[in-house]
Image (cartoon, rainbow, N blue to C red):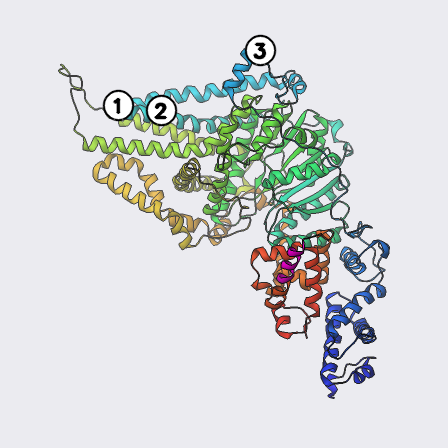
Amino acid sequence: MSSALTPPSAANGRLFRVGSDRLVQDWKEAHDRAVAYLDALAVPAADRDALADTAVEQALDRERWEPDSDAISETMRALRKLVPDRYPRPGPEDAAVPDPFLAWRLEVAATGSVDAHVPATGTSLCAAGPVPFASTPPLARGAMVPEHIERRIGRRVLNRLRGRRSDSHDAPRGHALRVQRRALPWIGAARRRRLLFLFLVLIPSVVASGFMVNVLPHQGSTWLEVVIVHVFGALFGWISIGFWTALLGFFLLTVRRDRYAITRLDAADAGPFAPSGRTAIVMPICEEPVDRVFAGLKAIHRSLERAGGLPHFDFFVLSDSYSPDTYVKEEEAWARWGREVGGFGHIFYRRRKVRLKRKSGNVADFCRRWGRKYPYMIMLDADSVMSGETLVRLVRLMDKHPQAGMIQTAPTAVNRNSLFARIQQFATRVYGPMFAAGLHYWQLGDGQYWGHNTIIRIQPFMQHCALPRLPGKPPLGGEILSHDFVEAALMGRAGWTLWLAYDLDGSYEEVPSTLLEEMKRDRRWCQGNLQHLRLLFTEGLFGAHRALFINGVLSYVSALLWFFFLTLSTVEAVQNALAEHEYFPHGASLFPTWPVWRPNWALALLAVTGAILFLPKFLSIVLVVARNGNARSYGGLARLTLSVLCEIVISSLLAPIRMVFHSRFVVQNLMGRTVTWKSQGREDAETGWGEAIRHHGFDTLFASAWGTTLYLLNPGYFWWVTPIIGALILSVPVSVLASRIGLGERARAWKLFLIPEESDRPRELRELDGEYEAAQRRAATRPPAENDGVVRVAVDPYTHALHRGLLGRRRSLRASIRATRATLLRHALSAGAAALAPRERRVLLGDPDLVDDLHDKVWAESDHERVRRWGRPGRV
């Protein structure tokens, strides 16, 4: 026997007595496999050979050994009993734990060391019971049942004529609060402000429509011109809403006095932070970038610790992820975070097995399970970051205002690098505060909920905000997709107030990095917002929330109106060019009817429209200087002004492109075409030329044909629509170049589109950057095979333990199902993880028995080719 085959172990003599060289080789491989597994367990190197020797000795002692026995399997079985005895961990009694080795690995995962002298950093992951694992707090179940929603206004009117009032059993709950609401001091001010706002929007729209009548050649005497005038009036009113909202916000921020601001705290409210109960910070996720999600949560956690509020908050990561690669990374990231900060008692993770109603269903599931434990929850999106001071202040505000159901912050867009995203960040940072203040001016306590960066009072949310299923099929029926506005309206109709904390800093989010990514998001939002038409006449809703429903619909329908207006105007121009004018349309007359074209009136109307669109942007510059004393954090006054001018030019190029996309979305929804609701892209990306041509190519051809036809038939009208036609013709290069990260970084170097969060980066964002970069470096050091979630569970002992613990107790299955899954396991072992279909991967990692067998058999595998397919570390 070659000395190379002789293991340096106490079992040397025993191996010689086994017999053949082949068996000696088998036991040598078993010894090496045990050493490799101990290495994966991070057992000290000095102890690995001795433990492996003992495992081989115990395997050889088994009386049933025959010459063809599986040496590796028996050695690994012995090793799993030896390791917990050699490195005992504090935990439940063995009698209470079905799998002591699993419990031991979970305990080690909680501390990060096999050393029994290393104290646990938080609440133990193990707990006595059928499953030695706890990633969520004890249940405190509560009900969350949808209220009746009566949408048939005719039936309601008829019932009232019959004497049946809204206090019947079908009426919404919360009537007492609605009565109390009428006495709140802001109610009268809100009524007056909304009447003023309505007046400011309607009167100029009517006047502008009159101007449009006189601009048209026939002064509105044809049916085509009548339609044009009405569509123009609707569009003018739409842009007037934004203009007057911004102007009122400018007034509010300039005066710097707002008696109704929800953020006002008295000196008595600034004492020690002693809230009425714990607050849940809730982040629902689904197939999100895991490193970015947990980097943001860690930054929030540290900021809360500095603010002194950490003992009063619990974190919940609520996953709907369905890909093993994603949710295995989530489990590992959660365990690593809990171990680092000793947070297993207040940092929780749960992944739903049944993903009903997407995000709203995930939040409702949390409320039913644990809502009774918490007075408030702070809702986050996957890209949200909030400072600890802001979180603490939100809780103080809710304690101070017991009638408040929600307080929505105005998040600042940050962290993107592409040119397109930097422009969006700049626009929201410079113009956003003014628009947010304007929204608050006319909404007051009837504000809106944007779905994230918001604190919510859980009890009324559970009582009133469960969402029913709309009758009919998608896209306008079925599950309510844009749930946030609906939840706000339902809470408002119950008498609770909803406020926009427009002047509260320390709230951040991220925007899509490319135009196409933004359009994918808008495609989903369009379908959800159009559903609000079905809820517009819901019984009991306040007028402000109905207005918000209409506003959400018009966000997309206005694009179709604009496209319709351009189409009608083009028809009018072509008709005037081709048709011979009829000078005596009413028979013999002394005076002919002359077509009249008033270019001066048209220019005046264009100037007014331009002022409505662009004046708020220049007022924002005034506001920046007035509030900050200088514009240094934006690169200086000259760079700020230049950035605004560049933003106007680029947004003018993007507006027609968005118009075409949004018009297409509305038409597709009205035709019954639905969209798959997927998570938004959260990371920087760039648009390739091929992708841009696929999405913009038809629009380019259409605009080219449109422009050519107009130029040949009516050159005068052609020059009026040149900015729109030109933008569509250039849509491919605009989309591609705007997505370039290099151009964004160059703009930053020139101090264009600079925002204060880049000039003086908040600590939370710096910590987010550091955590994300560290996670990216950690992922880069892994071999490619180890980024596969199935491989991680099969190979890594601690990843397997975490995933197995989260799966819970074993399940009883029919014999036929168990046989099918056994076949799947054999296929996985022989072909490797890469050969499994997505559904097979989910089934494999969703069955506790299969997960256990997969881990055991992969490590006991003796076929070298199969070992290679699994890429197991330390393979022989």
Q: Position of residue 526 (x, y in %)?
A: 48, 37
Q: Quadrant of the C terminus?
A: bottom right
Q: Which residue is mark 2?
A: 230
Q: Is residue 871 left or right of residue 681?
A: right
Range shown magenta: 814-824
Q: Earlier in the sequence, mark 1 or mark 3?
A: 3
> Does residue 799 show up?
no
Q: Earlier in the sequence, mark 2 or mark 1?
A: 1
Please state which amino acid type lies under the numbered disc 1: Thr
Please state which amino acid type lies under the numbered disc 2: His
Q: Earlier in the sequence, mark 3 or mark 2?
A: 3
Q: Position of residue 51 (x, y in %)?
A: 81, 72
Q: Position of residue 311 (x, y in %)?
A: 77, 41
Residue contact at pointers 3 and 2, CB within 8 angstroms: no
Quote the CA–CA distance across marks 2 and 1. 13 Å
Give the vertical position of 825 relative to 345 (above or below).
Answer: below
**What is the residue that sits farthest to the front in this orientation?**
815
Q: Which residue is mark 1?
A: 222
